[in-house]
Image (cartoon, rainbow, N blue to C red):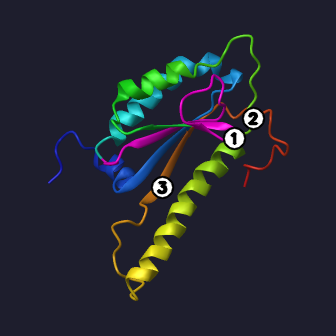
Amino acid sequence: MLSPKVDIYVKAYFDNRDIKFLVDNGSTMEPYWTEGVYLLETLVKMANPFDKDGMDLYFTSPYPPSVGSEDNFSKLALHDSKESAFRKAMLGKYPQKGVWTTTDITVAIKGIFREFFDRLEKTGRQTQKKSRNPWAKDPEKPKALTLIILTDDIWKAMKNPNTING
């Protein structure tokens, strides 16, 4: 039975999934940053009961640089999954006034999916070695991925502006 605090609609989308947040921290996001922090905290609070190993927070721009930044975007693994940790990370990546930081969101998205598919491929190879039954349940197999993106949809650094459009 669900506790009264667990929203069944949120559970339908977040249960048994690996939840990752990607925040556009280009300079065009500066006017929306306060609302973005609040929205992220709200989503973290809602998703927290469902991602047991902690949610990841990524930023489109490594500026200002942070510990653990990779490639041309930043990843912060916040395994305590407390809203305050996400708030602190957001405030540390506040878009700089007077510094024009453009973003190419495809770099961050490709990095996140590359990481996910590498893990999936690795666990697939390990599963094949362990068992001949391809339908056997593997506890090491990565969970399905939910990627939540907070952006203003202005990605000036993209070479092809229609890359994201379907």
Question: Percent position (x, y) of residue 74?
Answer: 59, 35
* Magenta residue check for 58: yes
Most frequent secondary structure within the magenta stretch: loop
Q: Which mark is residue 61?
A: none
Which residue range is magenta in the image? 50-74
| Tag 3 and tag 2, C-beta contact below 8 Å | no
User: What residue did someone put label 1 on?
Assistant: 105
Q: Which residue is mark 2?
A: 155
Q: Is 166 or 15 nearer to us in this picture? A: 15
Left or right relative to 114: residue 49: left
Q: Residue at x 48, y 25 (%)?
A: 89
Name the spot of residue 46 as percent of width and height, x first. Answer: 34, 38
Give the residue type that dot 2 points to.
Trp
Local SS, label 3: strand
Q: Is residue 1 left or right of residue 21?
A: left
Kindly state the secondary structure of the residue where label 1 is placed: helix
The quarter of the rendered structure image containing the C terminus is bottom right
Residue holding disc 3: 145
Q: Identify whether 63 is placed above or below 103.
A: above
| N-terminal-most mark, 1 or 2 | 1
Q: Amino acid at mark 1?
A: Ile
In this rendering, the count of numbered labels is 3
Q: Earlier in the sequence, mark 3 or mark 2?
A: 3
Q: Quadrant of residue 15?
A: bottom left
Residue 63 figure quarter: top right
Tell me if residue 109 comes above or below residue 134 in the rendering: above
**Most distant residue in the right direction:** 159
Structural crowding at the residue carrying mark 1, measured as other residues with C-alpha within 10 Å and reported as few (<14), some (14–19) or many (≥20): many
Residue under the point 45% across and 60% down? 144
Residue at the image position 32 percent from the left and 51 percent from the top: 11
The CA distance from mark 1 to mark 3 is: 18 Å
